[in-house]
Amino acid sequence: MCGIIGYIGRDDAVDLVVEGLRHLEYRGYDSAGVAFPTDSGIEVRRCKGKIKDLEAIVYVDKPVANVAIGHTRWATHGVPSEYNAHPHSSDNIVLVHNGIIENYLDLKKELIERGYRFTSETDTEVLCHLIDRYSRDYTFEEAVMMALKDVRGAYAILVLSARDPQKIIGVRKDSPLVLGIGEGEFFLASDVPAFHARTGRVIFLENNDMVILSPEGYKLMDLNGNSIEREIEFIPPMAAGADKGGYKHYMLKEIHEQPRALSDTLRGRIFPERGEVNLSEFGLDEGMLRGVDRIFIGACGTSWHAALAGKYMIEQIARVPVEVDLASEFRYRRPLIGDKDLFIAITQSGETADTLAAQREAKRRGALTLSICNALGATSAREADAVFYTHSGPEIGVASTKAFTSQLFSLYLFSLIMARIGGRLEEQDAVAMIAELLRVPDKIEKIISNEDAIVAVAKELFKAKDFLYLGRGILHPIALEGALKLKEISYIHAEGYPAGEMKHGPIALIDEDVPVVFLVQRGVLKEKVLSNISEVKARGGKAVVVMSDSLLGEVRQADYTIGIPETNPYLEAVLMAVPLQLLAYHIGVLRGCDVDQPRNLAKSVTVE
Ligand code: AGP
């Protein structure tokens, strides 16, 4: 879950690498470093902390080099520190790594017996010494290939050699690595934004691809030294999004961007007048879907919450059975999935290791695979049989917000598709459901315009140590999401629960110090949740009630109420998410937390 970048060309490599690391900081930000050739060998500068701390040590008698590699870290092996930071070096080899070397302890033992001295606790240093060991008898390229034959695990690496300073070798297996092809300059990075300001011509490296960069160009080969061809793709300039646009934090900006992001999710995807969804935008056709008996959805974190809400939408609107799994569980439970089933992977980054593994497992068992993804050209999208891009725009804040509501929109669209194909939805009903969808962005604008009321609630509750979030039906996953946002952003312990479960345990937690956030919807469940509120009030708890404006008059015992505009029961899940995002954000800010880069987290979890 680190970010790596390398540059070779005519320009100031260290500058470009540090700039690239700024764009990769969402992947990890506990330590960072760069390396570049000098007349006396490869120089490494690294430190504990963020890119701004690295800049402090890089821009002292700044080096001039046309080749450099860099790394921003999310620690897996060894505490965040200067000595565990990348780049790691061994005699004439220096490298940066994103991933995990699973058999590093065995290799380490062998290397120590060969006289290598270790200065870090990392798995990466093992690979560095291993390449160095082989480089004594083989060429730079051969040494890298030999070493990788000995290791097991996931890696994207960039390697420099003091004997071959005008070269960068990059290899990818399971962790993402993209080649950027500029005018007489070349980049290798974990993600396109790291160099997108310089070029949109990219090659997404496949597993076991090796690339050798030199000022003259790039060579692609497999790990046996055979030349390979890869298609050059063009990534159009990204929607403006990489800067904060005047907001204090990316998270707040991305919450406020949701009306536009959701409009972009719908652009070119619906025919409102016919109540139809443009199936080709999902990369699917009716034939493929008619044969689907069951749908499985696999995901992690916030995307898993979208999957749970998606189950309600698809089963209730299209009456097709849906099984939802945490991807980290699905991949190991020998799932009963086969060629009559569809597996949907939901993933903002498209690089989450567990979700990729679940998608591959489903494919291996014969299922049709669909990726609902936000990052253009990400691994999940490229490996799936079909992909639906959510088009939320770049999401920089580690806590997912606009990507979540776009995922809910995508699942709503998919429900309509399955319902129309299954003859479960008349045209006029479909027209009405799409018309309501088109009204949601304005309704979110209305919620955002009422932000002060949410700030007022945050000011009352930001000192709490525990929170409970309760919802029923499709609002249970939204309660889970509200709790996750608060945990991620404010480090307050929070739990989401189906409200009906409260009496079976969580009610023991209730006292005047535990705010309980209730998500109340119209319909059969309303009364049930209103009585849950009374039960909490009877035990001295504080009740925060989020519900549609028209129902506000019916809540007598709430300590705080947050109203949202009316909509249908499925899209209420989208509207309800927004005040919960804002509540978590403002409580995080009031507690002085780094809301864009919360401790211990990273935007994309690329290792298991
Ligand atoms: C959400 O705020 C977190 N960043 C995290 O739970 C995230 O949803 C999870 O890691 C899945 O990421 P993905 O959607 O990129 O696969």
Image (spheres, rainbow, N blue to C red):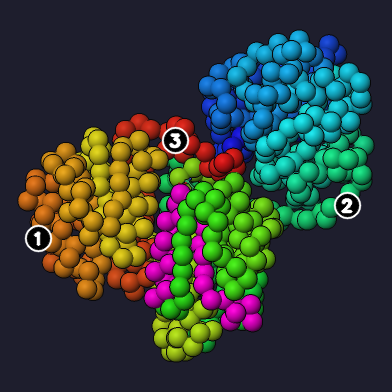
Query: What residue appears at the point 78 percent right and 13 percent down from the top-left corner?
Result: 114
Query: What residue appears at the point 63 percent right and 71 percent down from the top-left corner?
Result: 339
Q: Which residue, given by chain and number where applicable, does mark 3 sit on?
A: 598
Q: Any magenta on residue 298?
A: yes
Q: Which residue, given by chain and number where applicable, does mark 1 sit on?
A: 556
| Cα distance in 3D space between marks 3 and 2 | 40 Å
Q: Which residue, given by chain and number where applicable, does mark 2 sit on?
A: 229
Q: Give x and y (percent) for residue 251.
A: 45, 45
Judge left or right: residue 306 versus residue 394.
Answer: left
| Cα distance in 3D space between marks 1 and 2 | 68 Å
Judge left or right: residue 492 versus residue 407.
Answer: left
Q: Amino acid at mark 3?
A: Pro
Q: Amino acid at mark 1?
A: Arg
| Cα distance in 3D space between marks 1 and 3 | 37 Å
Q: Which residues are magenta?
A: 287-316
Q: Residues within 10 Å of mark 1 (few under 14, many from 20)?
A: few
Q: Give x and y (percent) for residue 437.
A: 43, 73
Sequence-wise, the earlier of marks 1 and 2 is 2
Say if residue 51 shows up in the picture.
no
Query: What residue appears at the point 68 percent right and 44 percent down from the top-left corner?
Result: 174
Question: Do labels 3 and 2 touch, CB within 8 Å?
Answer: no
Q: Nearer the viewer, mark 1 or mark 2?
A: 2
* Quadrant in which residue 209 is drawn: top right
Q: Give x and y (percent) for residue 493.
A: 30, 38
